Image: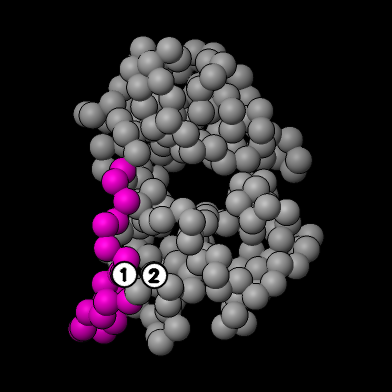
Amino acid sequence: MDHNTTSAIMEVMKEFFPSNTSVAVSNAKTFIYYQPSKLVDLHIQPGEPVKQGSVTAKAIAEKHQVSEYIDSEVYGIPYYAMSVPTFDGEEVTGAITTIFPAKPTPISTNFFTIKSEDRWYPVPYEQIIYLEAENRKTKVQALNGDGYHKLNLTELEFMLPDDLFIRVHRSYIVNVNHIQEIQPDSHSTFLLIMKNRMKIPVSQTYSSTFRKALNY
């Protein structure tokens, strides 16, 4: 995509990212789009090469999502970022990177408060089966029912404890304790069968991170 097309798409997509987040889009070698936030600015210019040691470079080289703190040696200021590679078949074509001044503080409680119809319910983490992006909010599926959280999936990904929850798809985060089995799947690399029998795909973007997290 050219710079104008990418800019138009990102103007629509930026509302899905957490506030005060810088966003960079690159092809396999250079950046083609950059939008800084008020809190962190790496001063990236379209056409500038992707720097070695950056989160973007690591995601492209390793062909999977990378979330990492980077010290000031790369861009002159420390930052925390998540970069997700883009693919054309098996070939990595670039990456989309969200940049934060620091990793967000995890939610201090061990439960979610979700809204169902006109009421709110606290749900302990261990009872949450999966979270799904739906209509710019997050659907939370729990053992005793479901409801919605006002934060989007990307915001919650950085706030949830990573020993329980893992992103497996752009639309899903799962609680690893509720995975019944993992099946190979030609369309999404893996298919998760949850204990409630829900089937959730693991996309190519997240497959390497998923395998590392589950040690197989």
Q: Position of residue 63 (x, y in %)?
A: 66, 36
Q: Position of residue 17 (x, y in %)?
A: 35, 45
* Residue 76 falls left or right of residue 19: right
- Amino acid tagged 1: Phe
The residue lying at 27 percent from left, 63 percent from top is 109
Among numbered discs 1 and 2, the one appearing first in the sequence: 1
Label annotation for residue 177: none
Do the numbered discs 1 and 2 sit on residues whose CB atoms are within 8 Å?
A: yes
Q: Secondary structure at mark 2?
A: helix
Q: Which residue in the rendered view is the most extreme toward the bottom? A: 144
Residue 186 in view here: yes
| 118 magenta-colored | yes
| Foreground residue among 145 and 22 | 145
Looking at the rendering, the stretch of residues picked out in magenta corresponds to 104-123
Residue 7 in view here: no
The residue beneath circle 1 is 111
Quadrant for the N terminus in the image: top right
The residue lying at 34 percent from left, 39 percent from top is 103
The residue beneath circle 2 is 125
Q: Position of residue 43 (x, y in %)?
A: 35, 16
Figure check: 30 above or below 63: above
The residue lying at 59 percent from left, 33 percent from top is 59
* Residue 155 falls left or right of residue 206: left
Q: Secondary structure at mark 1?
A: strand
| 39 magenta-colored | no
The residue lying at 30 percent from left, 30 percent from top is 101
Figure check: 177 above or below 153: below
The local crowd at label 2, few if under 14, some if 14 to 19, many if 20 or more residues have their Cα within 10 Å, is some
* Residue 113 falls left or right of residue 92: left
Quadrant for the C terminus in the image: bottom right
- Amino acid tagged 2: Tyr
